[in-house]
Image: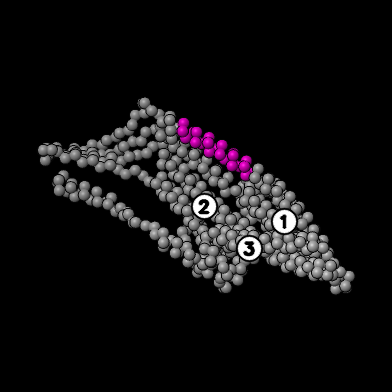
Amino acid sequence: MDRSRLAATLASVLLAGCAAQRYEPAPIAPDAVASAFNARSLADPGLHSFEESSFGRSIEAWPPAEWDRTTLSLAALYFNPLLDEARAGVSESQAALKTAGARPNPTLSLTPGVPSPYLLTLDLSFPLETAGKRGYRIQAARNLELASRLELAETAWTIRSAVRAALLDYLMCLRSLDLLRSEAEFRQTQVRILEQMFSAGESRRLEVDAARSELSRAHSALRAAEEAGAEQAAALAAAIGVPAAALRDARFSWPDVAAPPRAESLPLAEIQRAAVLNRLDVRDSLAQYAAAEADLQLEIAKQYPDVDLGPGYSYEERRSYFTVGLSAAIPLLDRNQGPIAQAEARRRKAAAQFVVIQSQAISRSERALAVYTVACEGLAEAERLASIEERRREATRQSVRAGEQDGLDLAEAEIQYSIAARARLDAAAHAQRALGELEEAVQRPLAPGDEFPVVKDLDAPR
C-alpha cells in the first residue's frame, strides 16, 4: 500500500470524529434574574397561551376578572421555579438514557517504525459487548427516566396543593376580617349605649369597663387579622411564583369554600385504593425498583467478559501483512461477586422502600379520612350554632322594631351572631384543610367539579 494513501485514509478516519459539540457559557446574572422575577404578571401573554392550551379552548377576556383554584394552579405551573428544577431532572435522566444506549467506539492504534521507515503497524479494535449488557443499561436508564417524570408530576401536584392551601388561608382571612370589622362596629355601638346609660344612672361602671375591654380585644384581633392578611397574600404570591405586587389588583373566587363535600361521599375503600394506585411516590418507588432489578441483571451479565475484535495491518520491508485479533479478559480472579452483591442489596433496599412508602400511603389516607370526618362533624355543629344565632338576631331585630327591645339588645345579638359566624368560618377552614390533607394523601382532587386539566408538555421548558 502506498504510504501516502495510508496516511490520507488515517487522516479521514481521525477527522470523522472531530464534529464535536462546543462549550457554550451560560452565566447567571443575579440582577437580571431578580428583575425578570419582579416583572412577572398575571397578565403575561405566555401564561394566556399556556392556560388556553391546558383548557383546550380560547380565553377571550385576559386576564380573567376572577382567579379560581384551577387558573391559579396553572399560573403556578407556568411561573413556579420548582417545576423548572424538576424539568432539569427529566432532561438529565433523558441524557442518561442516551448515554446508556451509546455503543463503545473502536480503537485505532498506529505504531511507526523507528528509525526504519519500512516498519509500520496499524491495528483497529472493535469492542463487542456480550450477555445483553447494553440492553440492561438501557432498561435501567429507562426506568430512572420514568421515575424522573413521576417526580416532575409529583412536583406539579405539590405546587397545586400549595396554591390551594395558600388561597384557602387568604380567602378565609379576608372573610374573617369582614366579620371582625362588623363585630368591632357593634361593640363600639354597645359601648356608646352603655356610656349613655351610665351617664343617666341606668348602668354600672363595671358594665361599661367590661364592654370597653371587649372592644379593645376586638380591635386587637382586627389588627392581627390585617397583618395575617398581608402575610397570606405574600404566601399566595410565593406559591404561584410571582411577586406580591402581581396580585395587588387580582380578585379570587372559591364559591363552595364553606361547603366541602360530605365525608360520607368518600368511602374508605375508595380512598385506600386511590392511595395505593394513584400516589406518584408509590409509582416512583416501583420505577426505582425496576431500575435496581435491571442493574442487578447488568452486574450478573458482567460475569461474562466483553470481546475486542479487530483487524491489524503491518508493513515491514515493503511487505504487507494482515491479521485478525481477538482479546478478552479472563475471569479467573474475579467473577464480579462484589458488584453483584451490592446490586442485590440495592434491589432489596428498593423493595423495602416500596413497602414502606405504600404502607405509609395507606395509613396516611386512613388517618386523613378520619380527621376529615371529625372536621365535617365540627362544621355541621358550627353551622347549627350559627343558624341559632341568626334566628336570634332576626327575632331581636323584629322586637326592636316593635319596641319590645332596645338597641343594646340588638348590638348584643349582632355580636353573638358575628362570633358564631366566625366560628363557622373557622370550622369550614378546618374542614377544607383536612380535605386538602386527604387530597394530598391520595394525590387527586376530591371535591366535585375540581378536576385538574391535563397539562400538555409539562416537561417542556418555559
Residue range of the region highlighted in magenta in the rendering: 341-362
Q: Which residue is mark 3?
A: 226
Residue depicted at 32% across the width and 39% down the height? 127
> Label 3 crowding class (10 Å Cα cut-off): few <14, some 14-19, many 20+?
some
Label 3 residue SS: helix
Residue depicted at 32% across the width and 44% down the height? 105
In front: 217, or 10? 217
User: Looking at the image, is mark 1 or mark 3 earlier in the sequence?
Assistant: 3
Q: Position of residue 225 (x, y in %)?
A: 65, 61
In front: 45, or 434? 434
Q: Which residue is mark 1?
A: 427
Name which quarter of the figure residue 141 lies in: top left
Instruction: Say if the magenta span includes residue 147.
Output: no
User: Looking at the image, is mark 2 or mark 3 earlier in the sequence?
Assistant: 2
Residue 32 disc label: none
Q: Is residue 417 visible?
A: no
256 sits left or right of 291 in the view: right
The quarter of the picture where the N terminus appears is top left
Q: Residue furthest top?
A: 333
Residue 152 disc label: 2
407 sits left or right of 273 in the view: right
Q: Amino acid at mark 2?
A: Leu
204 sits left or right of 351 in the view: right
Q: Amino acid at mark 3?
A: Glu
